[in-house]
Amino acid sequence: MGMDAETTMSEENQERYRTIVGVRFKERGKVYNFDAGDIPLRKMDQVVVTTEERVAVGTVVAEMRIGDDRPLPPKLKKVERRATDDDIATAAHNRRQEDEAHAFCAERIKERGLPMKLVDVECLFDRSKIIIFFIADNRVDFRELVKDLVQKYKTRIELKQIWVRSEARMCGGIGICGRELCCVSFLNNFAPVSIKMAKEQNMLLNPEKISGLCGRLMCCLSYEHEFYSEHKKDMPKCGKFVETPMGRGKVVRQDVLNGKYYVSLEDGNEVEIAIDDLRRPKGDTGNSEESVK
């Protein structure tokens, strides 16, 4: 009787939680969250899910349990089932066909001299369509390439042009920070990134230092932009004159994180001053462009 009561309590406690699993469809692909429902899953289990566009087989790489009193993330899709042996065999066959189609497509692109870069090939789980992802600077007439592929694989062919940031997400990699690319690990959307963000964070405008593997400005430049913008609102810009306890001088550098300025005094010395100690000259609005004489 004690064991029955213990089992019942365990089952009741289990019902208070729901499981969300992170599923990856390719070895270096992005992780997507799904509602596992009442399907018991663990890491490395293979599952069949329905995304917004298609049915796919993926691997569980993360799991998280949340209480029944907490709402699920919006538009969260459910895991259809644990993958069967037939599902796994179909997925393996599709991967082999993707590799073959990638090699064939690259060969045809080269032979036809098409100005496009092949990025990836995806075969749908039901083999109803093969999607070719590519990059190109301009419009490409790929009608003959489509004919080649249709004749070879006897299925629907879709060519989808993507941009370089999407290529980085699909191919994956390690950033200069030593971590997996943000676009692969957690970013759902690409936020606009500008060179102004790098300037406001006092970063060296060296393309090698502020560019990601995609060749564009790093997505992480936008993470602290709001903080810098907010804390710079009341600060005189570099080149403006301020009054300090040591005399009048010109702001030459800002250290927003530590709340300090570096000021070049009129006697040539450079001093470090806390923001609270800085006072603008009377009547100075912060817009003067005069230089130290």
Image: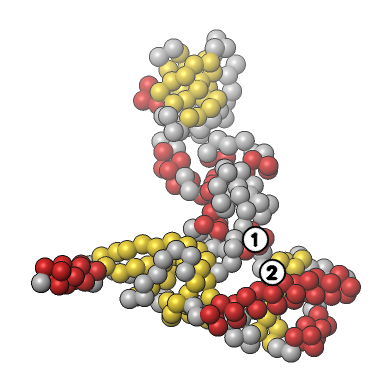
Amino acid type, callout 1: Cys
Marks 1 and 2 in Cβ contact (< 8 Å): yes
- Between 242 and 125, the residue placed more toward the observer is 125
- Considering only vertical position in the picture, is 122 above or below 128? above
- Considering only vertical position in the picture, is 200 above or below 11? above
Left or right side of 38 for 240? right
What residue do we see at 41% from left, 36% from top? 234
Mark number, residue 258: none
Left or right side of 182 for 247? left
Q: Which residue is mark 1?
A: 171
* Numbered disc 1: secondary structure: helix
Q: Of marks 1 and 2, which one's residue comes earlier in the chain?
A: 2
Indicate the position of residue 131 as horizontal and vertical percent values: 67, 78
**The N terminus lies in quadrant:** bottom left
Q: Quadrant of residue 184?
A: bottom right
Residue farthest left in this picture: 1
What residue do we see at 68% from left, 43% from top? 207
Amino acid type, callout 2: Asp
Indicate the position of residue 14 as horizontal and vertical percent values: 24, 69
Q: CA distance from mark 1 to mark 2?
A: 8 Å
What residue do we see at 69% from left, 87% from top? 156
* Numbered disc 2: secondary structure: strand
Q: Which residue is mark 2?
A: 120
Coloring scheme used: secondary structure
Crowd class of label 1 (few under 14; some 14 to 19; many from 20; radius 10 Å): some
Residue farthest top in this picture: 267
Q: How many marks?
A: 2
Indicate the position of residue 28 as horizontal and vertical percent values: 59, 61
What residue do we see at 81% from left, 80% from top? 145
Indicate the position of residue 116 as horizontal and vertical percent values: 78, 68
- Between 9 and 192, the residue placed more toward the observer is 9
